[in-house]
Amino acid sequence: MENKFDRDEKLMRQARFHVLAKRLILIHAIFYIVINLGLVGVWLLTTMGGYFWPAWSISGWGLGLLVHGFLTYILFSRKKLNEKIQKEYQNLKNDEKTND
């Protein structure tokens, strides 16, 4: 049986995970911008007017960044998370009452 401290600790771990996930998407976006700007810079200095090869990195990595953002902000949205946490909390409370 899980006590109140264990439940609070579990909720705190989940909250930390979601804060970290949101920070990681920001770091991912910053690296995406900086590195792809660098690749465009290399393209400008070497083959300007030729084949725009940085498009491969921009589009491929951009798709990965969109998926990362989707997973972070849509699937782990605060509202859904809070609803799930409250539902689980109530289930645990009800189980605790029936076991007493």
Image: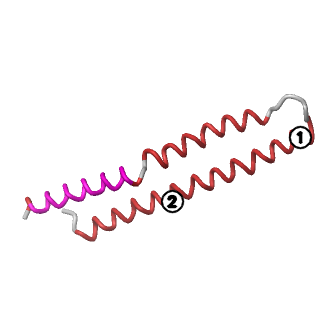
Q: Which residues are magenta?
A: 79-97
Quarter of the rendering occupied by the N terminus:
bottom left
89 lies above or below 77: below
What residue is rendered at 30% in x and 56% in y?
A: 85
Amino acid, disc 1: Leu
What residue is rendered at 54% in x and 44% in y?
A: 68
Residue 77 locus on image (x, y percent) = 42, 50
Amino acid, disc 2: Leu
For this view, does 37 lie left or right of residue 2? right
For this view, does 29 lie left or right of residue 9? right
> Label 2: how many residues lie within 10 Å, few (<14), some (14-19) or many (20+)?
few
Q: Earlier in the sequence, mark 1 or mark 2?
A: 2
Tag 2 residue? 20
Q: In which quarter of the view is residue 27 placed? A: bottom right
**Which is more toward the observer, 99 or 15?**
15
Disc 2 element: helix
Tag 1 residue? 44
The colour mode here is secondary structure
Q: Residue furthest front?
A: 79
Q: Is residue 81 magenta?
A: yes
> Label 1: how many residues lie within 10 Å, few (<14), some (14-19) or many (20+)?
few
99 lies above or below 43: below
